[in-house]
Amino acid sequence: MADFLGRITARIGMLKGVLPLSRAGAARDALAGVQLASMDIPQVLGYARIAGMPAVTGLYTVFLPLVAFALFGASRHLIVAADSATATIFASRLSTMAPASSAEYAALAGMVALLTAALLLIARIFKLGFLADFLSRTVLVGFLAGVGVQVGIAMLGDMTGVPGHAASSVAQLALVVRELAQINLPTLGISLLVVTSILLCKRFAPRAPVPLVAVVAGIAASDIYGFAAHGIAVLGPVAGGLPPLRMPSVTWQQLLDLLPVAASCFVMIVAQSAAASRVFAEKYHESVDTNADLLGIAVANAAAAFSGAFVVNGSPTQTAMADRAGTRSQFAQLIFAVVVVVVLLFFSRFLQYLPHCILAGIVFTIAIGLINLQTLFAIRRESPGEFTLAVFTAAAVVLIGVEHGILVAVALSLLRHVRHSYRPHTMILAPGEDGVWVPVPAAPGIQTAPGLMVYRFGADLFYANDHFFVDDIRRLVDRAPSPVRWFVVDASAITDLDYSAARSVGELCETLKREGIEVIFARVNRYLRSDMDRHGITAIVEERCIFSTLHEALTTAGVEKPDQHVKAAT
């Protein structure tokens, strides 16, 4: 029966993250799902706070959206639910369009989820899962650090009892500092107790459900001692029962205003979800189907939109929590959803006593977790330039907002790649010890041998770097220690040649030939050869001067025993 069910679901593309599932595996995942619920329910309540939504909508994100991804996604480990990064992205824009937690705000949040689902579905149809590769891990680390700082600052008001809320992180921090005299000491004390307890237990007892204990204890103490009467703000009445199913209603103008917000959420979802699913798939030697995961997350966001929730994302933090809890398939997430249903039906009324400062403290610890100092220091040691990009991205998120920060992150990732292609590493084979030629950085005054220069260009040739290629070769030839007779281009790194670059290369080859310099192309792959033929470069340099190996090129240039000369270089 299990095999038959597996064949049916495989054919229709469902339950990839659940099946195959043994009886022992189901029991293990069921227990892990209950443990995950105990750790994650307080967090999703905090994410709802970040999103500016009623607390109960955090629970909605781990009901139908969680089930939807379990049915249609492919990853066995990815947790698709509320997430601090996407919550901050849309909250920063929606807070300027409607009051937080209002019916209009909830409708706008639902529409963002629906638009995000549409973008994810389009990405799945056109198999655009590769877009995740355009957000580098370095910049993503910086982006999440910036989100952590922004979220942490946003929680300071609730943690201290200081009234008021500012639109930007800088203004919010200034507000808290300016109103220090209004700090509510009981509120601050509870916040510090929650934060300290969570951080200590995260260090010494990572599996302990401290956030859940804090929530339960806070609710009980608030009810018994009347926290609200002592100036400690509480959530107030929380709607119980299962989420109502309805279509979010917005105006056409609002729809257009929300498209950039949904696009920002889309980019973050693709990047974070792909990264999280790949990390844990590699850990357990499983395959990754990014496009199937896009479909699962699209359906999950549609479910969120119609069930009164907000944008859901493949959360690296919650996925790591699930792994620590022992989950090995999406069956654990289905059990998690069942636990949430029980809470919604029987325990939601107790949430009205939950102090804001406890939720803020939980969210503050989440924000701290987003700032991965260990990875940032590792980046700084290994690549100072990339560290600068990460810090710049983090600063952009804090100073100009998450919505624009994600665009900065994507732009910086692409610019770094383009910069390397624009000015790639170039090398020349130069005489070394015992007559062996070794690759050294290309610089005027260096020559491979009298009358010979072997030059390597470290990237594809295109319209932006062709002038660098031409100018570099001209400098090397003009300032060579002896007149150059043979100029060998090691083309092993060149796989593509566009129209503009072909014109420049062709003109350079013609100029060098007029000066009595024979241009030879070595290590030419089939793709570059096709471009050379199409653009007429083969006719300029002649067939006899194009080779697939460096050995043949050097032999043509009159080098005796070329293998002995370039042994170290190859």
Image: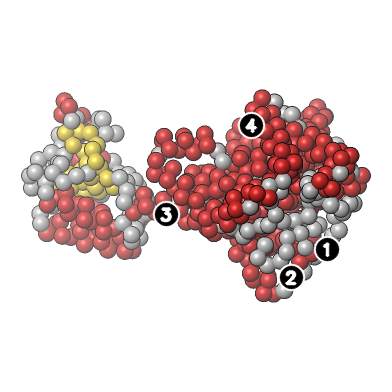
**In the structure shown, which secondary structural element does the residue marked by tag 2 occupy?**
loop
Q: Amino acid at mark 2?
A: Val
Residue 479 vertical placement versus 171 (above, below): above
Q: Of the residues tagged 1 and 4, which is closer to the observer?
A: 1
Q: Which residue is mark 2?
A: 250
The mark found on residue 284 in the picture is 4
Q: Which residue in the rendered view is the most extreme toward the right?
A: 346
Report the Cα–Cα distance between label 4 and label 2. 44 Å
Report the Cα–Cα distance between label 2 and label 3. 37 Å
Q: Earlier in the sequence, mark 2 or mark 3?
A: 2
Picture coordinates of residue 98, whole percent (x, y): 71, 66
Q: Left or right: where does residue 28 sit relative to residue 346?
A: left
Q: Nearer the viewer, residue 171 or 37?
A: 171
The answer to which image quadrant residue 498 occupies is bottom left
Q: Residue at x 13, y 44 (%)?
A: 445
Q: Amino acid at mark 1?
A: Arg
Q: Residue at x 24, y 47 (%)?
A: 489
